Amino acid sequence: MSTPIPEGSVVVTPTEVYAEVRATHDEVKSVSLKLDALPIGDRARTLNDHEDRIRTLERARWPLPSLAALVGVISLALTLWQFSQH
């Protein structure tokens, strides 16, 4: 005897899950084939372009944590200085 399904519930069958997995597989395969069709020079150029962009982003990000740490240390020093004045 099966339990009744509450109204408004969504039922996903294993067959539906399998169909979605197959569809995702097919899409990934399609993209992979398109990438494989690119000439080797284009792939290398695209990869190098992406590497350069990532490195630029990484270089631009490093001052933020350092600046936050510096502000914290200055705040601590000012707080200690204020307490020492009283």
Image (cartoon, rainbow, N blue to C red):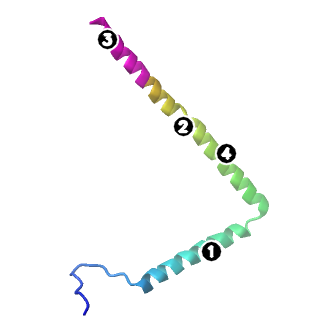
The residue pinned by badge 4 equals 52
The residue pinned by badge 3 equals 82
Label 2 sits on a secondary structure element that is: helix
Of pointers 3 and 1, the one earlier in the residue sequence: 1
Neighbours of disc 2 within 10 Å: few (<14), some (14-19), many (20+): few
Of pointers 4 and 2, the one earlier in the residue sequence: 4
Q: CA distance from mark 4 to mark 3?
A: 47 Å
Does the magenta stretch mainly form a helix, a strand or a loop?
Answer: helix
Do callouts 1 and 4 mark residues in contact (Cβ within 8 Å)? no
> Which residue is pictured at 48% across the width and 79% down the height?
20
Q: Is 36 positioned to the left or the right of 11 in the image? A: right
* Residue interval drawn in magenta: 72-86
The residue type indicated by label 3 comes to Gln
Do callouts 3 and 2 mark residues in contact (Cβ within 8 Å)? no
The residue pinned by badge 1 equals 30
Do callouts 4 and 2 mark residues in contact (Cβ within 8 Å)? no
> Which residue is pictured at 53% across the width and 75% down the height?
24
Q: Is 70 positioned to the left or the right of 34 in the image? A: left
Q: Which x, y percent locates residue 80?
A: 35, 14
The residue type indicated by label 1 comes to Ser
Q: CA distance from mark 2 to mark 1?
A: 35 Å
Q: CA distance from mark 4 to mark 2?
A: 14 Å
Label 4 sits on a secondary structure element that is: helix
Neighbours of disc 1 within 10 Å: few (<14), some (14-19), many (20+): few
Snapshot quadrant of residue 46: bottom right
The residue pinned by badge 2 equals 61
